[in-house]
Amino acid sequence: MNTSYSLTLTNLEIKNGFSSSSASCIFGQPSSTLVMTDVVLRNMTSSNYGAIYHNGAGSQVFGRLTRVTFLNCSSSALASSSASALTLIGPALNYTLEDLTFTDCLGSPTVYSPALMVRRTSTVLATPSAVTVAGNISITQTSPQSLSTFAVQLVSDSGGNSQPLYILSNTTKPANWLFSGVQFAMVFLHSPS
């Protein structure tokens, strides 16, 4: 997805994606919008960015993911750079994640990476970043991981600006985080400059 473009996917299964240089399914550029409803991503493998990498570095990204299922998504990138299934960099205040399922999406046998990463970087202008979470967010690992990893990473790199990263729960459909078979559930990292 190029800058300022929108992509809407509904009632779709996408499988067996691979990339050695980008995301295995969707690489969204700054100012782009991603809307997914009732979508399954299965067997996605990436060397760098996981299945979906929505990159708002420089200008925020917009989106709504509803009833999206990630099955067997892996990335050999280090956990500090991206997730195996879904990475959001600089999400705008109205980005929403609702009823998402992640199954067997905790990296590769040799590299750990979370299933979900939300990151606010200092390159995202002087505005806060936020994700509103609604309904069930289920993260399940059915096979044992040899490496320790967090299922969810929330990262705020403040750099030269002090705008926050918000993770909000929807008031009418509160977030319910479900973890099964994972060693560590969630971590928040802050990297001041």
Image (tube, grey):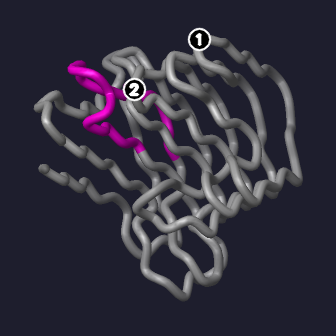
What separation in Å lies between label 2 and label 1 (alpha carbons)?
12 Å
Query: Which residue bears the numbered disc 2?
Result: 58
- Please, is residue 192 above or below residue 93 in the view? below
Rendering coords of residue 25 (x, y %): 76, 42
Magenta part of the protein: which range? 118-137
Q: Name the element at disc 1.
A: loop
Please, what is the three-letter code of the amino acid marked with disc 1? Answer: Ser
Q: Is residue 19 magenta?
A: no
The quadrant of the rendering that contains the N terminus is: top right
Is 39 left or right of 67, judged from the image as shown?
right
Q: Name the element at disc 2.
A: loop
Examine the image and state in which quarter residue 145 appears: bottom right
Query: Which residue bears the numbered disc 1?
Result: 4
Rendering coords of residue 10 (x, y %): 79, 20
Main secondary structure along the magenta-highlighted residues: strand
Q: Nearer the viewer, residue 54 or 137?
A: 54
Query: What residue is drawn where x is 62% and y is 21%?
Result: 34
Q: Nearer the viewer, residue 87 or 181?
A: 87
Q: Which mark is residue 127?
A: none
Question: What residue occupies the far bottom of the structure in this picture?
Answer: 146
- Please, is residue 32 above or below residue 105 in the view? above
Rendering coords of residue 21 (x, y %): 71, 54
Is 113 left or right of 12, judged from the image as shown?
left
Rendering coords of residue 67 (x, y %): 65, 31
Q: Nearer the viewer, residue 128 or 100?
A: 128
CB atoms of marks 2 and 1 within 8 Å: no
Query: What residue is drawn where x is 37% and y is 54%?
Result: 153
Please, what is the three-letter code of the amino acid marked with disc 2? Answer: Gly
